[in-house]
Image: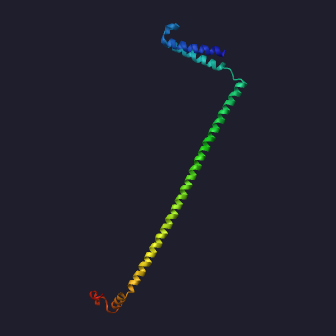
Amino acid sequence: MFTFLIIVFLLSIIAFVVGLIKPSILKMNSRKTVLKIGSASIVGLFILMMITAPELTAEEKAERAEQKQAKEEAKLAEQEKEEEKKSAEQRAKDKKEQKEAEQRAKEEEEQKIKEEEERKKAAAKKKKKKKEKEAEANRPENIVETVVTEHFGEDTIDNEYCI
């Protein structure tokens, strides 16, 4: 019955198209009549086909269930592969970040060492300048100048006659 309805349904679609092109072939007066009768027959035949459609056998149901399960398993396997790929990428990214962090820490340590060396050099320069000032202050002419300035004032010193 189902097969017969499918054949009639397909023939009614062909007749509907032919009737819309030339209604006189189907012995109808107008396209409007073809449209009303043809669309009603197509809808009616489609409903009858769906009512008389055969049910699936147990074997077909089992086969479809297997196909569905196989698709789900393939999908799960694909998701697992994607997750593994993402985790591998994440591990690589983490390693790269760790190396970069270690490199930054190394560079910071080197920078601190350089700064400490510069501070030591600056301190050594200050000590050297201080010693030079002390040595300059301990020179006999400077000692004399200091003593004269303390006792007689600055106005009394004439630098033109100093050697």
Quadrant hosting residue 56: top right
For the point 47% across and 71% down, the residue is 119
Residue 92 position in % (x across, y down): 58, 49
Quadrant hosting residue 145: bottom left
Toward the left, the furthest residue is: 160
**Residue 25 or 70: which is nearer the viewer?**
70
For the point 63% across and 41% down, the residue is 80
Side of 6 relative to 131 (left or right): right
Side of 148 relative to 60 (left or right): left
Residue 109 position in % (x across, y down): 52, 64
Toward the bottom, the furthest residue is: 151
For the point 63% across and 20% down, the residue is 50
For the point 61% across and 14% down, the residue is 7
**Relative height, residue 149 to residue 8 (above, below):** below
**Residue 11 or 30: which is nearer the viewer?**
11
User: Can you say which quadrant of the picture contains the N terminus?
Assistant: top right
Asked whether residue 102 is in view, the answer is yes
Toward the right, the furthest residue is: 58
Residue 102 position in % (x across, y down): 55, 58
Side of 70 relative to 22 (left or right): right
